[in-house]
Image (cartoon, grey):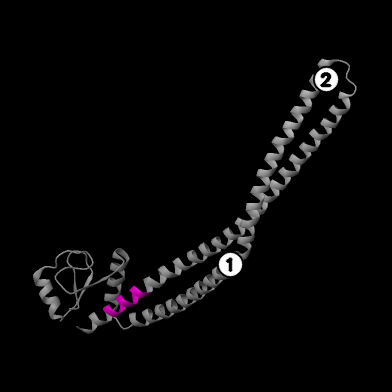
Amino acid sequence: MDSDTQLLLKLHQLDQEIDRLKKLKEKIPQEIQSLKKEEENLIHRLEKIETELNRLQFLKREKELDIQTFEDRILKFRDALDKVRTNEEYKALLREKAQAEESIMEIEDEILVIMEDMENLEKEKKNLNQNIEKERKTIQKQIEEKEQKLQNVKEQLDQLVKEREKLKKGIKQSLVSRYEMIKKKRESAVAVVDSDTCTGCFLIIPPKVYSELVKGEKLLACPHCGRFLIYQPK
């Protein structure tokens, strides 16, 4: 393998690592944001339970006031029963009194359902309160680890970019220009092969080109995709 080929291979390997780190640099902040959203959802779940408990408590008070209204009405019916003059008036008051008592029973059933819902929510709230701090600490730890990883990636990336610039200075400018042009179009400017198939475009390398490639006496390019070919047998 001649020196140009060795330098281009090293540049190619550097670029592969740089590309990998760039993807990580973009991916990690998204993962951090996802963890923060998960933490927000924990708090939101607790707030949602509190809101529903307040709503049910308000509804229960309304129902209790309704019962009080009907009970007041029943007392008035009882007073009125002692003062009626006709049998029809007496029967009408009894019906209204019975309807009020039936309404009270229905409302009491509704209150029982509300109280059952509140009890279930209180249990859920208690369980969530017991676990939420533990879950938040776990999430916070994961966020810190991701942030540290992101910092490490940035530092590695900066170092590799510097190495790349230094390496480029030792390669012929014409090769660097050609390499950069191919990389811009193909993402990867080098195809490392161990057979007669280009690993960039997956087309067969002509026998003559492949024969010269195996000899390793000069730098060759794939006649199909233009990538530099580097032969590395298994």
- The magenta segment is 9-17
Residue 136: image tag = 1
Query: Residue 21 in the image: x percent, y percent?
Result: 40, 72
Choose between 198 and 84: the one closer to the eye.
84
- 139 relative to 211 in the view: left or right: right
Q: For the residue labelled by badge 2, is the local secondary structure a helix, a strand or a loop?
A: helix
- For marks 1 and 2, the one nearer the N-term is 2
Up-down relation of residue 127 to residue 169 (above or below): above
Considering the whole magenta stretch, tell me its main secondary structure.
Answer: helix
Residue at (59% x, 65% y) in the render: 131
- Badge 2 amino acid: Tyr
Please say whether residue 114 is one of the residues in the magenta stretch: no
Choose between 93 and 9: the one closer to the eye.
93
Please say whether residue 13 is one of the residues in the magenta stretch: yes
Q: For the residue labelled by badge 1, is the local secondary structure a helix, a strand or a loop?
A: helix
Query: Residue 107 in the image: x percent, y percent?
Result: 71, 37
Would residue 178 be seen by someone viewing this image from the given angle?
A: yes
Query: Residue 114 in the image: x percent, y percent?
Result: 67, 45
Q: CA distance from mark 1 to mark 2?
A: 67 Å
Query: Can you tell which quarter of the image residue 87 is in?
Result: top right
| Quadrant the C terminus occupies | bottom left
Choose between 33 and 202: the one closer to the eye.
33
Q: Are marks 1 and 2 in contact (CB under 8 Å)?
A: no
Residue 90: image tag = 2
Up-down relation of residue 59 to residue 165 (above or below): above
- Badge 1 amino acid: Arg
